[in-house]
Amino acid sequence: MVYDCGSCVAKYFLCLFNFIFFLAGSAVLSVGIWLAVDKNSFIGLLKAVPSQHLPQFTQPAVIEQASYILIAAGAFMFIVSFLGYCGALRESQCLLTTYGICLLLILILEITAGGLVAAYRGKAEVETRNFLTTTIRKYPIEKFSTGTNESNAITLMWNHLQAQLHCCGVNNYKDFNTSHSERVIPESCCVLEGDVSLLKPVYPICTSRPTETNSYYLVGCYQVVVDHIKSNMNIIIGVSIGLGLLQLLCIFLAFCLSKSINGYK
């Protein structure tokens, strides 16, 4: 058992911090497992809620893909926070060291990824554009329609991104797979009326005859997102530095507490 003041502060900080993430990870993991095992009950629950926005989220493919994402994210949060919480609470050198190493590896990967993107910015941009374009061309344009029952997480994400940012495709409307279809763009690329999340075009003809007046068919989402990031760069840098410092603090406290426990043995 640790006795000095610094070790006690480190112990209870790690306990509190990781307990919060442990609860959050458990909740996310539980919801993901629920969706994967019994998606029908979730669909029934959503349909019981009167809302115009929920039907598009009740497609089986959307729920199935969302469940995998939630399970992966929840399991990661659960395991890492479990190591930190139990290691601090039980004063286990093994668990604390493993926790500190995990956070250190995550931090190294984050710094490495950032460095590679900065060093190979041009190539990274090309590869990112190509990857995003494949996520659109993989599906026929009919799957982006608001009236289809074949939506999935990817088409749903693109629809909402385009509707919110007033853009179309990665580079422009030519990114869509329009073979064997009279449609040129999905509804989300059109000028929308009222609540944009409902994807209701002001000019219904825009899906087959888009112009700069009735749609955003020439405005690529990639450049819009890049411009948005640049305009909020100070906030992004501040948040990134804050998260990095928080990770460093947890790593420092974990190794210090581990060393302190070893000193009292």
Image: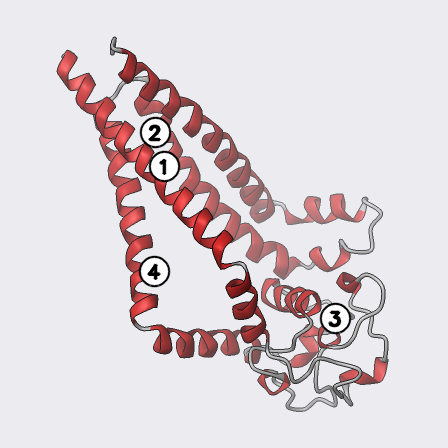
Q: CA distance from mark 3 to mark 1?
A: 40 Å
Label 1 close to label 2 by CB (< 8 Å): yes
Asked whether the beta carbons under mark 3 and mark 4 sit within 8 Å of each other, the answer is no
Which is nearer the eye, 112 or 136? 112
Residue underneath mark 2: 84
Please tell me which of labels 3 and 1 falls first in the chain.
Answer: 1
Looking at the rendered structure, the secondary structure element under dot 1 is helix
Mark 1–mark 2 distance (CA, rounded to whole Å): 6 Å
Mark 2 Cα shell of 10 Å, populated few (<14), some (14-19), many (≥20): many
Nearer the observer: mark 3 or 1; the answer is: 1
Q: Find disc 4 in the rendering and name its residue.
A: 114
| Residue underneath mark 1 | 80
Picture quarter with the C terminus: top left
Tell me the mark number nearer the camera, choosing from 3 and 4. Answer: 4
Q: Would residue 227 be found to the left or right of residue 244 on screen?
A: right
On the image, which quarter does residue 140 sit in? bottom right
**Does the CB distance between marks 3 and 1 fall below 8 Å?**
no
Splitting the image into 4 quarters, where does residue 57 fall? bottom right
Give the mark nearest the N terminus, 2 or 4.
2
Q: Residues within 10 Å of mark 1 (few under 14, many from 20)?
A: many
